Amino acid sequence: MNIDLTHISETEKIFKCLLRHLEEKEVDEELYKITEPYLRMWLLAIISGFGKNQLRIKILKEEISKSMPQTESYFCEAIKNMWCEETVGILVETFSTAPWINEHYLLNYNEIVSTVANSITKDLVIKLVKPMLDKELSPFNRDILQLWYDMGLKRRRQVH
């Protein structure tokens, strides 16, 4: 199946150009008012390209339990743009308790799992993932955290 998605990337480019001329606080306040999850995450993915701040991280935390995995590609973009210990902590907490983590998710929606696995550092796995692995987890949740732990321990240097 061939689907032309060039109009979406063009829309994002135009949107980013327009946003550059607005105050960050104003943009964030408007983003926070949006209640439709798909639109909110699409805009967060774009706006997070200008940097992370507490309100953007708060929106990521609010949405991850409400609209995952339907908006997974936007989450990945926002995670990459806002990569920090706090963001990783949110992901570890979510993926250790999320009831929607199951075989279907792992087979069809694993972009976030891969994004974190490819970026997490040894320091972050020791500080954030290891304590969660000591708790009781479902097999699927444990598998994801174990993957992150293993990948982070193999990484010797800071990725970001």
Image (spheres, grey):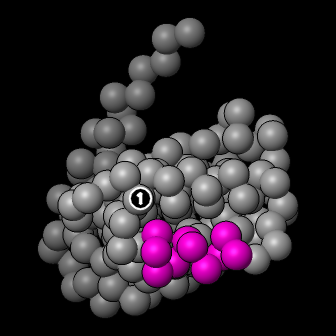
* Residue shown at 55% from the left, 71% from the top: 129
Crowding near pointer 1: few (<14 within 10 Å), some, many (20+)?
many
Specify whether residue 151 is painted magenta. no
* Residue shown at 37% from the left, 52% from the top: 154
Q: The N terminus appears in which quarter of the rendering?
A: top right
Question: From what the image shows, is residue 95 above or below residue 22?
Answer: above
The answer to which image quadrant residue 153 occupies is bottom left
Closer-to-camera residue (86/128): 128
The answer to which image quadrant residue 37 occupies is bottom right
Specify whether residue 128 is painted magenta. yes
Closer-to-camera residue (23/70): 70
- Where is residue 150 drawn, in percent x and y? 50, 53
Question: From what the image shows, is residue 105 above or below residue 123?
Answer: above
Q: Which region shows up in magenta?
A: 125-134
* Residue shown at 41% from the left, 73% from the top: 124
- Where is residue 67 drawn, in percent x and y? 69, 61
Q: Main secondary structure of the magenta part?
A: helix
Residue at which label 1 appears: 152
Q: Is residue 114 left or right of residue 5?
A: right
The answer to which image quadrant residue 134 occupies is bottom right
Amino acid type shown at disc 1: Gly
Can residue 135 be seen by looking at this rendering? yes
- Where is residue 105 drawn, in percent x and y? 74, 43
Q: How many marks are shown on the rendered structure? A: 1
Dot 1 lies on which element?
helix
Can residue 57 be seen by looking at this rendering? no
Q: In this view, does 44 lie to the left or right of 89?
A: left
- Where is residue 137 drawn, in percent x and y? 80, 67
Closer-to-camera residue (40/67): 67
Q: The C terminus appears in which quarter of the rendering?
A: bottom left
